[in-house]
């Protein structure tokens, strides 16, 4: 999806959102990737965010992959993606005991 005009409200996309140099977005945005070459004001949730040389972003960006090219600007705050997306890799204690027993028997 590409924005060449003005959009206000909520934008949700499973793919890439491009805000062109003529684009102005004042919204809460959720997308896989967002490329900003125009103006963005709001809250943004994305896996990847790129602010290009003419891009200006204000607000809150929730992303673990943010790139601001020389000339681009960002005023606001960044936050890591939600903890809900993190998978716990801890093993139950029972598995630890079984591994310890195997190590002792083989050692």
Image (tube, rainbow, N blue to C red):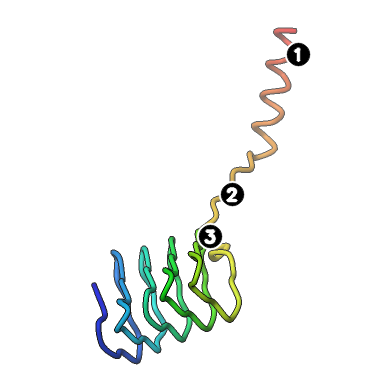
Instruction: State how far apart marks 1 and 3 are (Cα).
Output: 42 Å
Instruction: State how far apart marks 1 and 2 are (Cα).
Output: 27 Å
* Residue 105 pos. (x, y %): 72, 10
Q: Are marks 1 and 3 in contact (CB under 8 Å)?
A: no
Give SS at disc 2: loop
At x 32%, y 76%, the residue is 19
* Residue 90 pos. (x, y %): 64, 43
Q: Would you say 105 lies left or right of 65 here?
A: right
At x 48%, y 81%, the residue is 43
Front-lying residue, 34 or 51:
51
- Please determine whether, in this image, residue 60 is positioned above or below residue 103: below
Q: Give the mark nearest the N terminus, 2 or 3.
A: 3
Q: Give the mark nearest the N terminus, 1 or 2.
A: 2
Quadrant in which the C terminus appears: top right
Q: Which residue is mark 3?
A: 64
Q: Which residue is mark 2?
A: 88
Which residue in the rendered view is the most extreme toward the front?
Answer: 71
Give SS at disc 3: loop
Question: Which of the 4 quarters of the picture holds residue 50?
Answer: bottom left
Instruction: State how far apart marks 2 and 3 are (Cα).
Output: 18 Å
Question: Which of the 4 quarters of the picture holds residue 95?
Answer: top right
Q: Which residue is mark 1?
A: 104
Mark nearest the camera among 1 and 2 is 2
Front-lying residue, 11 or 18:
18
Q: Would you say 106 lies left or right of 86 here?
A: right
């Amino acid at each position: 999806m590409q924005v060449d005009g003005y959009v206000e409200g909520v934008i949700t996309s499973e793919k890439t959102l491009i805000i062109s140099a003529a684009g102005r977005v004042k919204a809460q945005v959720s997308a896989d990737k967002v490329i900003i070459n125009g103006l963005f004001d709001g809250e943004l949730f994305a896996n990847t965010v790129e602010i290009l040389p003419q891009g200006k972003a204000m607000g809150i960006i929730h992303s673990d992959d943010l790139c601001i090219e020389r000339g681009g600007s960002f005023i606001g705050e960044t936050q890591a993606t939600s903890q809900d997306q993190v998978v716990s890799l801890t093993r139950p204690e029972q598995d630890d005991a079984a591994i310890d027993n195997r190590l002792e028997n083989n050692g």
